[in-house]
Amino acid sequence: MSFLDRLLGRPKDPTLGWGVFSLPIPDFDLTAMRFGTLQFGDGFEAAAFLGQPDSLAWTQREYCELLYAKGGFQLDFDRGKFAYAGFFIGPDDYLPKHPDLEFSRPRLRGCTPDGMRLSREADRALIERLFGAPDLVDTEPSEEIFYYTRQGVTMEFEMDGKTLRLKRWNLYPK
């Protein structure tokens, strides 16, 4: 941490000393609502197995975003606890601005016997086949969002309004 960071009261980088991030990204286990070994509510150190992110941003005093651009996902920590996961699956106006950003193809376990990968080819029929009817649907001109709550975790499947294909998958505690 630099003198300027201390002077301005910026928190230190909690990922210092973590290894290098490498693909593939871990599976997301839907039965345990866990990304690799990381579960909602875990502290920063529980994410160390992923390696250092491509960028880290303190958007508020105690809210930190870790962007893994090459993996196509972001993890957020609120007050030092894992609070949000977002997987960037297809084109979207609100993607993080990073030169190395790639689209994610997260592998899900616990929804089919062999697991499956989410991709931008996923449509409403596939999501409903995997998870049933959504708890809620938010329809806007630019997107449709399907909401599901499982084991205290909200899952949002954001579909592009024109193609009706998956563009983003968000998860956070209810």
Image (cartoon, rainbow, N blue to C red):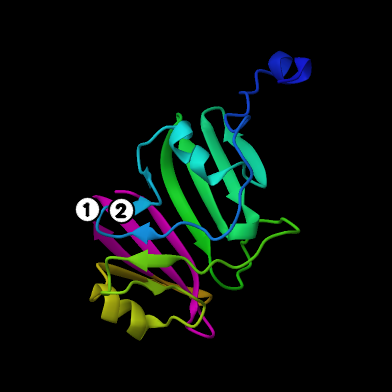
Q: Nearer the viewer, mark 1 or mark 2?
A: 2
On the image, the x and y values in percent for residue 11 come to: 61, 23
Amino acid identity at mark 2: Met
Q: Which mark is residue 33?
A: 2
On the image, the x and y values in percent for residue 95 come to: 62, 61
Packing grade of label 1 (10 A; few <14, some 14-19, many >=20) is few
- Tell me where the magenta segment starts and ends, as one range: 146-174
Packing grade of label 2 (10 A; few <14, some 14-19, many >=20) is many
- For marks 1 and 2, the one nearer the N-term is 2
Residue for point 55% across, 56% down: 73
> Dividing the image into 4 quarters, which one contains the N terminus?
top right
Q: Is residue 106 magenta?
A: no
Please, what secondary structure does the residue beneath circle 2 have? loop
Residue closest to the eye, 16 or 142: 16
Residue for point 46% across, 56% down: 26
Residue closest to the eye, 154 or 116: 116
Q: Residue 150, relative to residue 78: is it above or below? A: below
Label 1: which residue?
151
On the image, the x and y values in percent for residue 62 come to: 51, 29
The answer to whether marks 1 and 2 mark residues whose Cβ atoms lie closer than 8 Å is yes
Q: Is residue 157 magenta?
A: yes
Place residue 138 in its image quadrant: bottom left
Amino acid identity at mark 1: Gln
Residue for point 27% across, 70% down: 111
Q: Residue 70, relative to residue 132: is it above or below? A: above
